[in-house]
Image (cartoon, rainbow, N blue to C red):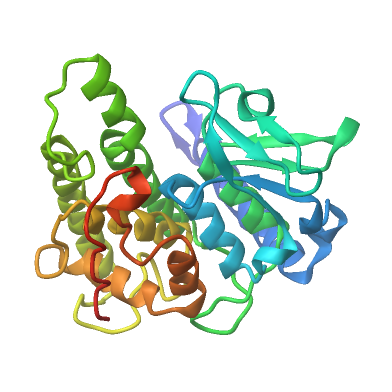
Amino acid sequence: MLRLGRTPIVASLQPFRMAATAQSASRKLASARKAMIHSGSQAQGPSPATWKLYWSPHSSAALRVALALRVKGLSPAQSIMCTPNRAGADGNAYVFDDPETGEAVEYRKVNPEGRIPSLQIGDGASRRLLTQAAAILEYVDEALPSTDPLSAKTASLLPEDPWARARVRQICWLIGADIHPLQNMMMLRAATRELGLPRSDSLQTHPFRQHFLTRGLAALDALLAEIFKEEGRSASENLQCCVGTTLTLADLFLVPQVRNALGADVAVEGVYPHVHAVWSHCVALPEIRETLEACGGVVQSRQQNGERAPKRPQPKL
């Protein structure tokens, strides 16, 4: 046996063989998981008819989930959508009227964090609750088969390829962690009322909000430019998605965020070409455009944030 120093070459290669074996097994498990999802085997779980989504059309985080349900083929009537009707006693927590019973529900009793969205699966003793949009989206993606609007083929919202899947999550976290919190209306209200942030004529177009939206969109556009280059795409081409050629979770994060930016008077077209290419394509899809229009418009108007202002014209696509 050949030796490298005192270590047999065969032994020195063993970790690499183990790694290759693990990678092969990982790929097989991923393929099996995808096959199970796409074959409908996951339908053994609770039916979407028993799902209860606590959300608001004014929340971009909740809108991500509403878009996913439509893209996955569910009509609004196929799951229970709970929309808040007023603020709770502390002025922050939501109060929902249960669509089934008509009873008022203090949302903090459902989700102690008091933030939306949350997805309730089942009821009574079997009740389970998921919070955080990203976790809900991955559950929805794996629990439901889908027909991608772009290709009319069953598709997952997370690519099977590990690198593409990581790219999707990279975009989701850039938007969800780096952009969204710093332009969130609840945060801005607290900052201007309680923490000394200077007020402006409009909270929605507050310079603080615009600053972090433009900063975040610039980073997002640079990332998309890198991904487009990897995939041999150009921002001038039609049918653009964030990653690959089918809708992914990244697109469902991007659409509500660009909607917020446009509502804050932040220019996107001509400034962030890659972001605008994805946005323009996504909002042309009936499932996405109809959902946005049902939530108050492709661009969120100021009236939805408690401000009086002329209704903004919807962009021509």
Q: Which of 251 and 36 is in front in this view?
A: 251
Which residue sits at x=40%, y=71%?
Answer: 244
Which residue sits at x=74%, y=64%?
Answer: 78
Q: Extreme top residue here? A: 195
As drawn, 54 above or below 189: below
As drawn, 285 above or below 47: below
Q: Residue 63, percent across and down?
A: 48, 53
As drawn, 123 above or below 150: above
Tell me if residue 14 can be seen.
no
Quarter of the image with the C terminus is bottom left
As drawn, 145 above or below 210: below
Which residue sits at x=50%, y=67%?
Answer: 291
Q: Nearer the viewer, residue 142 or 68?
A: 68
Q: Quadrant of residue 108?
A: top right
Q: Nearer the viewer, residue 265 or 13?
A: 265
Q: Residue 264, percent across and down?
A: 20, 51
Q: Residue 184, percent across and down?
A: 32, 37
214 horizontally vs 308: left or right: left
